[in-house]
Image (cartoon, rainbow, N blue to C red):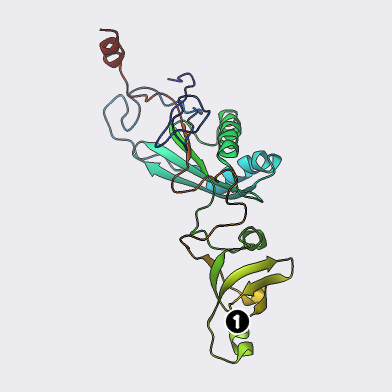
Amino acid sequence: MHGGSRHGSRGQAHPGGRGSGPRGTQGRSGSGKAAAGSAGQDRAGAVKPPAPLPDADRLARLLEPVVHAMGLDLESVRVTAAGRRRLLRVIVDGDGGVSLDTIALASRELSARLDGASDMGELPYTLEVSSPGVDRPLTERRHWRRAVGRLVIAPLTGAAGQHAGNGMTQAEGRIAAASDRGVTLDTGAGLREYSYAELGPGRVQIEFGHLEPGGEDEPEADADSELAVLDDEFDDELDDDDYQGEED
């Protein structure tokens, strides 16, 4: 049964979105065409093995052009099982952060792209679109560039530690600059430059009461609390009694 589209939400609602409330999520349906009564059993009552999960790399290739067209980067695509549904998590990022309005627009564009393809298969799914959380490791040059002004800790490679000659195993400081060549950290005792080859994955440190550059602008969408959720379609297990009960 292929249901029509609907707006749904989980958690808080995105301002300005249909069915919106205070902040955060905007729902929108995708595809998903599982026949009613078919999930888990066939007509003979035999239990079917779970369907294989869609390939995340293939989905990334499908969705990346849409994200790039919006001037954003596709950071990750992950598919997991959530009961008899699948959960597709997409994380996007951009210079200057990603606003709630941008997340909402990305969710609509990605939903349309998925509706026009068969990569998610026949079973219902839920799509979550968000920006990276503070716990995202800094592994790409763009990650360091976008974290300028933040306090970070990063392990030093063996060569960097030996060059320092002081037994240091990690670098810690506030990112003063990030270029194509490397990163400049303000260690509190002065500025120290590191090449990217000298640094392992950086970790942004949580600071309370520290005002980030541009902090008075529109709040960014956070991966933990600001999810743009796209529910696939009405639950295929809703039967006629449910609708009749509403009419009564």
Amino acid type of the residue tagged 1 in the rendering: Ala
Point out the image quarter for the N terminus: top left
Left or right: 89 in relation to 150: left
Asked if one can make out residue 202 in the rendered structure from this viewpoint, the answer is no
Residue 35, by quadrant, is top left
Q: Up-down: is 145 above or below 155?
A: above
Residue 81, by quadrant, is top left
Point out the image quarter for the C terminus: top left
Q: Up-down: is 229 above or below 145?
A: above
Return the residue nearer the eye: 239 or 162. 162
Left or right: 220 in relation to 82: right
Residue sitting at the far bottom: 165
Asked if one can make out residue 218 in the rendered structure from this viewpoint, the answer is yes
Residue sitting at the far top: 248
Q: x, y (%) of residue 144?
A: 63, 63
**In the rendered image, which residue does mark 1 sit on?**
189
Mark 1 residue element: loop
Q: x, y (%) of residue 117?
A: 59, 31
Return the residue nearer the eye: 109 or 211. 211
Rendered residue at 61%/49% (across/down): 97
Q: x, y (%) of residue 90?
A: 53, 44
Left or right: 109 in relation to 88: right
